[in-house]
Amino acid sequence: GQQVMQIPQYQHVQEGEDFTTYCNSSTTLSNIQWYKQRPGGHPVFLIQLVKSGEVKKQKRLTFQFGEAKKNSSLHITATQTTDVGTYFCAELSNTGKLIFGQGTTLQVKP
Amino acid sequence: DVKVTQSSRYLVKRTGEKVFLECVQDMDHENMFWYRQDPGLGLRLIYFSYDVKMKEKGDIPEGYSVSREKKERFSLILESASTNQTSMYLCASSLAHSNQPQHFGDGTRLSIL
C-alpha cells in the first residue's frame, strides 16, 4: 500500500545545532502535512505543502517539498530545548485520510 | 479554537472486557478518525467517518468497531479487549474540504491486563 518513509527515527543534538528530518515516497505525493507531537502531548498541525519545489518558513523551521513531489524535509536551525518532540510528515489523500510517516523523535541536550 | 475531547486520559481494563473510548469535537467537523500510536510504528488509522452513521475501515480495523450516531461524537469500541490492544489511542477531526489539517485529542492510554 501507499507508504511515506521518514528518517531518521531518532536524533539527538546539542542545543544550537541544526536538525533535519526527511520524508520519502516511491509515488508522487499530492501534498505533505507536517505535525509536531511534544512528549506526552498530541500531534499538532504545523504546515502543509502542495506545490512542487515549495519552500515555507516558520521562524527557525524550514519546510521543503521536492521538485518531483516525492520527498519533503523539515529543517530546524539552531535547535532549542522547546523543539523537543516527534515530528511527523503525512500525506492527505483525496478521501481525507492522512498517511503518516513513522516520525522522527528529536532530543535536544542543553 | 478547535477542541477534541477524549473521555479518559488513562484507562485500565481486563482481557475480554468490552471497552468504549469516546471522542467529542465542538467545531462541527464532518470527518472524524481513530488512530492508535505505538513506539516505532507511528500513527495507524483504525476507523474513520465522513458523516453521521457512516464509517470506513482504516489500516488496522480488526478487533475494533465504531459508532457515529451524532456528528460531534465518534466512539471506538473494543469488542473483546486483548493485551495486544494496549496502546495510546488518538481521536482526530477535520473539515470535509480537501487540504484541511486534522485536530487531535489528548489521547487515551489504554492498558489491557
Image: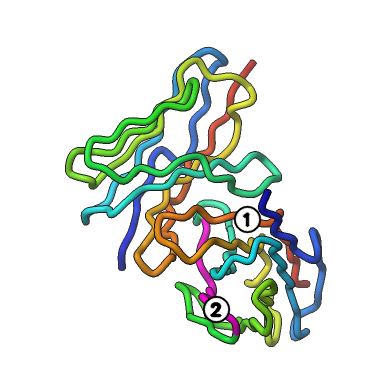
Q: In this view, does B67 lie above or below B31?
A: below
Q: Quadrant of the image for the C terminus of chain B?
A: bottom right
Residue A2 in the image: x percent, y percent?
A: 31, 63
Q: Nearer the viewer, residue B10 or B49?
A: B49
- Near mark 1 (Cα within 10 A), the count class, few <14, some 14-19 or many ≥20, is many
Q: Residue at x 74, y 72 (%)?
A: B22
Q: Position of residue A107 (x, y in %)?
A: 58, 29
Residue tagged by mark 2? B51
For the residue pair A87 and A51, the one nearer the viewer reads as A51
- A82 displayed left or right of A65: right
Residue B107, image quadrant: bottom right
The answer for which chain carries disc 1 is B
What residue is at 68 percent from the left and 87 percent from the top? Answer: B79
Q: How crowded is mark 2: few (under 14 residues within 10 Å), some or many (20 or more)?
A: some
Kindly identify which numbered label has been placed on residue B104.
Answer: 1
Q: Is mark 2 on a helix, strand or loop?
A: loop
Q: Look at label 2 and name its amino acid.
A: Asp
Single out the mark in the foreground, 2 or 1.
Answer: 2
- Mark 1 or mark 2, which is nearer the start of the sequence? 2
Q: In which quarter of the image is residue A71?
A: top left
Chain to which the residue tagged by mark 2 belongs: B
Q: Marks 2 and 1, Cα distance to the nearest angstrom?
A: 18 Å
Q: Give the range drawn in magenta.
A: B43-52
Residue B36 is situated, as x and y percent measured from the top left of the image, at 59, 64
Q: Is mark 1 on a helix, strand or loop?
A: strand
| A11 vs B35: above or below | above
Report the predominant secondary structure element of the magenta stretch. Answer: strand
